[in-house]
Image: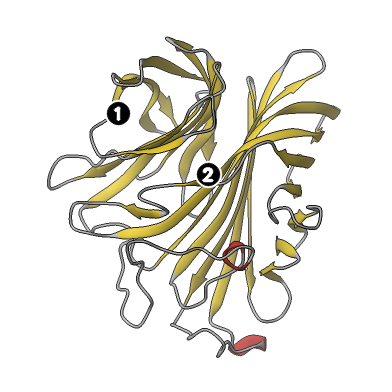
Amino acid sequence: MGSDADGFTLPQPDPAFEFPHDHGPHPDFRIEWWYVTANLTGADGAEYGIQWTLFRSALRPEAPGSERGGWRAPQIWFGHAGLTAADRHFAAQTFARGGIGQAGATADPFAAWINNWAMTGRAAPGDDALDRIDLTARGDGFGYELALTAGGPLMLQGRGGYSVKSPRGQASYYYSQPHYSVSGTLDLPDGPVAVTGQAWLDREWSSQPLADSQTGWDWFSLHLSDGSKLMVYRLRDADGPDFIPAGHVGPSGAARYLPDGAVELTPLDTARVAGREIPVRWRVQWDEGGVDIVTEPLNAQAWMDLNVPYWEGPVRVHGSHQGRGYLEMTGYE
C-alpha cells in the first residue's frame, strides 16, 4: 500500500466525482477496490456477517483512454470473500488478469466481477447505479446470493471524498454507501439460510495511500440504533502518533467529516487468533457526538487466512448506542 507511485495519478483535494463514471475503474491509479460488508440475521435469530471485496492493482500506469486489452493489460485483479457465524468462519480468495474477461468493472451498466463472483447493478433509470445491487460469491464450504437496496445517498469520506491517510499527505479518493438493506440466502455446509440485514459499501482508489511507517489499520463501519452511521479507522504508525479520521451520518441523513483525533479508539481485550494476539474488543468514543460504545466480535476467530492475512468480522455494539457493524484489522504479523 505504501510502495512507489511514480507514473501513476495521485489524488488531489476538492475532487469532483462523476457518477456513474466513478463507480467504474480508474486505471491511471495504482490500486482500488469495491468492498461490501453486511450484518445479517437468519429466521431463527442467528447472526452472520459477510464480506465481498474486489481489488484492482496495476503493474504499470495507463493513461485514461490508452488501456491495452488481452494479456498485455497490466491490471491484476483479486477478490476476497468471507462468511462469519458465531461458531465458524469461512474465507476464500480468487485471482485473475484484466483484459481477457476474467475480471473487471464497468460503470454503466454497473458491474464488478472476478471469475464466478459478481456485484451487479440493477438500479432503476435515473437512480444512482449503486442504489440496487446483487452480490454473489462462493468458496470452499460457503457461498451467498444477496440483494442490496440503498435507503439513502452516498457518503463522501474525508473532505468531500478526499481522504487523507497521514500528516505527511498520503491520500485516497473515498466514498461509501452505508444505507443498504439486504435480503438473500447463505449457503452453508448444513444447508441454505435465508437472511435479512444491513450492508455497507466502500469505494476507494489511490496510488500511495499509506506512509512507509504506517504498519496497518483498525477500521470500523457501524450501524447505530438511532439510525446513524459511523466510520472510523486507526492507521498505526511506527514513527509517531496513530492517525484516526472518521465520518458520521446522523439520523437525519446529514454527513460530516471528523478530523484526526475527534474519535478515540481504545483496545480493551485481545484474543489469540492464528498464533497472534489480536485486539478484538474495542471502546469507541466521540465526545462531541455523545458516542461512547464498546464493540464485541460475533466470532473472535474471524481470521482471513489468505495471501495477505488479516482479521475481518462482524461486531455487536453496546453502550450509549446499540448496533452492529464490521471491523477489519491488518498488519498483525
Q: Residue at x 37, y 29 (%)?
A: 278
Q: Residue furthest right?
A: 191
Q: Residue at x 49, y 51 (%)?
A: 175
Residue 300 image point, x, y percent: 50, 23
Residue 60 image point, x, y percent: 44, 82
Query: Which residue is under mark 1?
Result: 263
Question: Does label 2 or label 1 sit earlier along the sequence?
Answer: 1
Amino acid under label 2?
Asp
Query: 65 or 118, which is in the foreground?
Result: 65
Q: Residue furthest top?
A: 319
Distance CA(mark 2)–CA(mark 1): 30 Å
| Lateral position of residue 130 relative to residue 178, left or right | right
Q: Characterize the local packing of mark 2: few (<14), some (14-19) or many (20 or more) Cα atoms within 10 angstroms.
A: some
Q: Where on the picture, by quarter, is residue 169?
A: bottom left
As drawn, 121 above or below 30 = above
Q: Residue furthest left?
A: 240
**Considering the numbered disc 1 on the image, is that residue within a helix, a strand or a loop?**
loop
Amino acid under label 1?
Val
Query: Which residue is under mark 2?
Result: 305
Q: Residue at x 76, y 27 (%)?
A: 196
**Considering the numbered disc 2 on the image, is that residue within a helix, a strand or a loop?**
loop
